[in-house]
Amino acid sequence: MKKQTFATLGIFLILILGLGLTTANTSSKNGVTLTLTPNAHSGDVCVVNATVKNSNGTALYINFENTGWASWTSGSNISSGDSKFFTGASSSCPETAMAEIYNASNKTQKLFTLSINSTIIVAPTEENTLCQYENYNETSGLRISNFNVDNQGQGSDSSWQYLDPIQIKVGVENENRTKSVNDVDVELVILDSPIGQSGNDITSDFNLKDDIVTTIGTLRSRNTETATFNIDKLPTDLSPGTYYMYVMAYGNTDNGDKCVSTSTRLDNKHYYEFDIESVDYDKSIVAMPSSDESTVDSYCGQKDVQVSFPVYNLGDSDEDRVLVNIYNSKLGIDKYLVLNNLDSGDEQPVTLSFDVPTNLTKDYYDLHVTTSFDWDSSKDASDPLSYDRETSDKTIRVNILSCEVKAPTINAVLESSSEIGKNIVVQATITNNGENSANFVVAPMDFDSWADLVSVMPPKMTIPAGASQNVLITLSPKSSGEQTFKVSVAKNGKIFSQPVSLTVAKKPGIFSNFNISGTTAYLLIAIIVMLFLILLIVIVRLARRPVARNYQS
């Protein structure tokens, strides 16, 4: 069953039975009876409801399309002895309603026309139901057993305020004793006026999570299920005034469709009436932190703590500038942010940061949030005195969870050889001994005289309470011998260090593979140099020796 859009002309499909003003008109001919039940008139729209009974003895075809009424549920065969119901609408409101009667086996053979006076005018009524408007009959079988509106914000259940979270619950009961109702859906519709007064469907403006709940499915006999509708925050761009909420439950059985949209739980049995309150200008600019944004957990000495929340313009006037401030004297926090062009119905996000002092106790502190508006454009927008109005009824709680920083455990192990010409890798294991997860920053210190830093991986980490994480520190040594440095870890603004000692070997020489001591190596080098010099002298002397000449006669 597809939801139909409410016509903007407001065609009122009104079935008013049994009222004194609405005696039915009847016209008969050749065994065919046309009965006109009371029609409605409102503005330029008329509605006619008619029943045709066939006692002609043959099957007939009934047509209203060429009778002056713009829209009829017409064109239907009627067997002899049967009756059928028709509905017609027209903006011209003809004085006569006519039914053209054809032979069912030859629809080009027009037998006769039945005419009836259609000028019975009845006053508009609000007795329309959502089922009727959606072209379903109000039937037995389903019942709206409960209807409840729960305003979980500042307003009441019947008088809503902007940003209120609203929950609507609709209980649906299957009254059948033996049969289930299948494919049960529950629909919620919000109008700016009742159906009988040409109300416009503005359901989408309310940002309902779902306006049709389809999760009920099959509703077994005598069982009740509840459909829940939620509005997370009443939108700020809705106009103040009175609104009308309709609900409808529908499904199907072997005997046809079932639909119900009336209940004693509703106002006038048909709708729930509620108001959206207007907002005074003095209270129109508000900061509205959510439940998650209203509390921040921190610790002594924490840097760059951020708070975020939206600021809304609930009024009718646009604001060129709005000044937002968070303040707490004990924390030494006094931060400002200027918002530009906060128009009526709009919102803008705000993010402000601050540092937590180190000399606090484990306690909670409230940040007071103030919004200043009605700016004097000739003055500095960052000066609170440049604004004529302010609201300051919101706070953000800062919970200081810890001010006694427990030192982490730092263990360091050499993971590589340590000698000149090769990188030295030291693995540091950091253990969080605190009661909460914490951020750590790792850096080596006091190594500059004998090494260069290559890398620290990772330099920052978050370690859960009681857990450990490894860090690899890589150094490039410049000097050999006994060396030291520190593995330093910063936590919550405090620095903890663990000294590390190691021996850096010299760069291997040409005799390092022969297990020869340094002194012996120098002696061998001296002997080799002397032998080389002696050999050089011998070569020079031999080169200078005279060569015997051989004279031949």
Image (cartoon, rainbow, N blue to C red):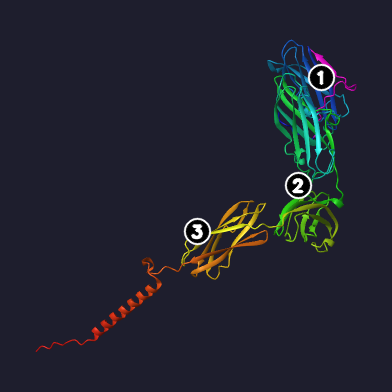
Q: What's the magenta bit mostly, secondary-structure-wise? A: loop
Disc nearer the start of the sequence (2/1): 1
Is residue 520 shown left or right of residue 436? left
Residue 385, given in percent of the width and then of the height, sits at 84, 62
Residue 69 appears in the figure: no
Q: Are marks 3 and 1 in contact (CB under 8 Å)?
A: no
The quadrant in which residue 80 appears is: top right
Residue type at tag 2: Ser
Is residue 375 shown left or right of residue 306? right
The quadrant in which residue 152 appears is: top right
Badge nearest the viewer, 3 or 1: 3
- Estimate how packed mark 2 is, as few (under 14), some (14 to 19) or many (20 or more) residues with alpha carbons within 10 Å: few
Residue type at tag 1: Ser
**In the rendered image of this protein, does residue 160 appear above or below residue 411?**
above
Residue annotated with mark 2: 291
Residue annotated with mark 3: 415
Residue annotated with mark 1: 115
- Where's the N terminus, which quadrant? top right
**In the rendered image of this protein, does residue 238 appear above or below residue 406?**
above
Q: What range is drawn magenta here?
A: 9-30
